[in-house]
Amino acid sequence: MKSLALALALFTTAAVPAHATPGFPWKLEAPAAAAKAGPRVLLMYDMEGISGISGPNQFLVGEPDYPAGRKLLAGDVNAVAAGLFNGGASEVWLVDAHGSGNPEADMPNELMDKRLKWVERDHAFDPYVDISTRGTYDAVAVVGMHSKNGAGGFAAHTYTIGVEIDLDGRNITETELVALSFGQVGTPVILATGDDKLQGNLSDMPWLKYVKVKDAIDPSTVTLRPLDQVHAEMTAKAAEAVRDIKTSKAMVMTPTKVTVKAVPPADLSVLEGFPGIDYHDNGVTYPAKDFHSAYRAAMPIIGVMRASLSAIVMRTVMQEAPNGAELRTKGTRALVKSWFDAEGGKVEPVEKPAARIERGDH
Ligand SMILES: [Zn+2]
């Protein structure tokens, strides 16, 4: 029996790649040494998990309470920024990762801590993967985050409405997406803020400093914590997070099977039976060697999924608008015109739409 147990133990050890963290689709590495002047921190924000925000009318542009939501966002960002500087950060770079539908950043410039600098590019970029380059930042702090789909958190979702992303069967949050993207270049996520459900989702990142800003009763109902308390805690924990960078971990994805699934209200069944795709149960599975390639491969699948979400919006527009039938006729005429123009060689090639950020993303 002893030799059998030993053999099994050996087999188990051998089956797990030597560098992987057993049971996880990633390995944990010590972060790279920080800049001499003090750590350079990337402060990335989302909006659903901002303190004081209790409904989508505060985080989607065009809704009546969106201006109030932006002020609440500024409160959290500045409270965290103050702590990062108190803790010794030499630079704090701000980036918007929320899809409010606003072509401008959701954080109002006039309310921003003047020490913060915007991450800027001369072209549209995806904050999740396009700015995670080695040696650029020493740590990442994520603010205003939300739980993954199905976790019962406030406005719970992953990437966009109706998406689930599994790594080796493990459903992950956007905070983990960010941690894996920056982990691939040796940069740890050191602080996160959001609701109680996200806090529960992140128990496998024990080095993370977390500030709970609200309790989610269900995806549309929350109990808010007082703003002054939350902000004081954010400043204190952000400072601690910078001081403790060395104890944090960079999460590096190991070669993994990725499944991108449509969950209600989205649908992916249009792909069923398409040759060459590993499709099952509204999801597509594929192998990926690292996180960045896993993420980029998910984009076309999510693109297909979006058609099912647009259909929901269009159905409502057509049914509710008094001139719905007229709109449909106009839309069809416009489509026919583009078709005839294209066949007649009259149009320039269509410019590829920016991959994101679209309303409802992140
Ligand atoms: Zn988000």
Image: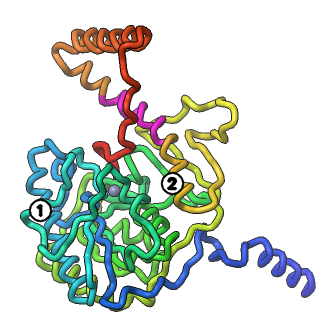
Magenta-span inclusion, residue 109: no
Q: Nearer the viewer, mark 2 or mark 1?
A: 1
199 shown above or below 306 = below
Packing grade of label 1 (10 A; few <14, some 14-19, many >=20) is few
Determine which quarter of the picture holds residue 133. bottom left
Span of residues in magenta: 302-313
* Residue 326 shown left or right of residue 252 in the figure: left
Determine which quarter of the picture holds residue 76. bottom left
Q: Identify the residue at image location x=48%, y=83%.
A: 31
Q: Earlier in the sequence, mark 2 or mark 1?
A: 1
Residue 295 is tagged as 2
Name the quadrant of the N terminus: bottom right
Viewer-proximal residue, 34 or 309? Answer: 34
Viewer-proximal residue, 278 or 32? Answer: 32
Q: Identify the residue at image location x=51%, y=54%.
A: 295
Residue 268 is tagged as none
Mark 1 Cβ and ligand 1 under 8 Å apart: no
Tell me whether circle 2 and circle 1 mark residues in contact (CB < 8 Å): no
* Residue 129 shown left or right of residue 69 in the figure: right
> Helix, strand, or loop for circle 2?
helix
Horizontal and vertical percent position of residue 359: 28, 43
Viewer-proximal residue, 362 or 292? Answer: 292
Amino acid at circle 1: Asn
Horizontal and vertical percent position of residue 167: 58, 59
Amino acid at circle 2: Tyr
Q: Identify the residue position indicated by label 1 in the image.
A: 109
Determine which quarter of the picture holds residue 141. bottom left
Magenta-span inclusion, residue 309: yes
Q: Main secondary structure of the magenta part?
A: helix
